[in-house]
Image: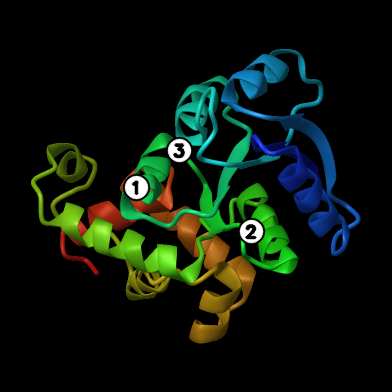
């Protein structure tokens, strides 16, 4: 798998590369940038392009959230994981809205970071550190209490989700990863992944955040 790392501190980029190499041999770092501006420049000519980018948030030239906002529509096949020391609400929510596929703290173990990389690469969830997942849940719950016309318009008047699909969404809202959901519900990871695809299809959405927002808004979970 091809990886990009964007961080304004060279020693942190090197440390992260060594961290990943200590656990996984199939991950290759093919692109490094010290800020969002350099990343956008390098991506224009990068061939091949990275599958997953580990993106710092606080950078001098162009921060990580703004970079994802610009890059996501230009390179839709690339997945972004925010890897940062910050876990405050505003950064989390702005990263989610910008299109980040995951949000982890830099203190996470190498194995957890690698597991998250494979999750987003395989469209198998939106990995978050546990504390971040709890904050994201509170944010989504708060959003569900606000009128969002576009959310209601995306669904029909009847409840489209099965009981199993609602169980999986509830687990996902608690920050559980696909493997944890599978273990909790006595299912296979493949079955959980297929249920999530069905949920996206039924609700006409492309992300877990949208699916949760619609379900909470309509009181399906």
| Real-space Cα separation, disc 3 to disc 2, in angstroms | 16 Å
| Displayed quadrant of residue 142 | bottom left
Q: Position of residue 176 (x, y in %)?
A: 48, 72
Above or below, 94 against 20 in this view is: above
**Closer to the observer: label 1 or label 2?**
1
Precedes in sequence: disc 3 or disc 2: 3
Is residue 172 among what the camera can see?
A: no
Residue 157: mark in rendering:
none
Residues at badges 1 and 2 in contact (C-beta under 8 Å)? Answer: no
In the displayed structure image, the side of residue 127 where residue 166 appears, left or right: left
Quadrant for the C terminus, please. Answer: bottom left
Q: Secondary structure at mark 3?
A: loop
Residue found 76% across the figure and 44% down from its top: 11
Residue under label 1: 93
Mark 3 closeness class: few <14, some 14–19, many ≥20 residues within 10 Å: many
**Closer to the observer: label 1 or label 3?**
1
Q: Secondary structure at mark 1?
A: helix
Residue under label 2: 116
Residue under label 3: 99
Residue found 75% across the figure and 43% down from its top: 13
């Amino acid at each position: 798998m091809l990886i990009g790392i964007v961080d304004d501190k060279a020693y942190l980029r090197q440390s992260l590369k060594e961290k990943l190499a200590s656990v996984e041999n199939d991950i290759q770092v093919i692109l490094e940038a010290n800020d969002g501006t350099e990343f956008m420049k390098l991506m224009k000519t990068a061939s091949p392009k990275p599958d997953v980018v580990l993106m710092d948030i606080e950078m001098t030239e162009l921060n990580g959230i703004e970079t994802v906002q610009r890059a996501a529509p230009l390179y839709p096949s690339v997945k972004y994981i925010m890897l940062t020391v910050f876990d405050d609400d505003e950064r989390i929510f702005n990263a989610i809205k910008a299109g980040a596929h995951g949000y982890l703290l830099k203190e996470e173990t190498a194995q957890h970071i690698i597991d998250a990389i494979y999750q987003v690469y395989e469209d198998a969830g939106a990995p978050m550190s546990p504390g971040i997942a709890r904050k994201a849940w509170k944010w989504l719950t708060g959003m569900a209490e606000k009128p969002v016309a576009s959310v209601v318009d995306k669904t029909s008047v009847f409840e489209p989700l099965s009981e199993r699909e609602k169980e999986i969404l509830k687990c996902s809202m608690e920050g559980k990863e696909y493997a944890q959901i599978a273990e909790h519900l006595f299912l296979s990871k493949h079955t959980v992944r297929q249920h999530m695809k069905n949920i996206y299809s039924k609700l006409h959405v492309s992300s877990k955040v949208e699916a949760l927002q619609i379900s909470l808004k309509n009181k399906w979970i």
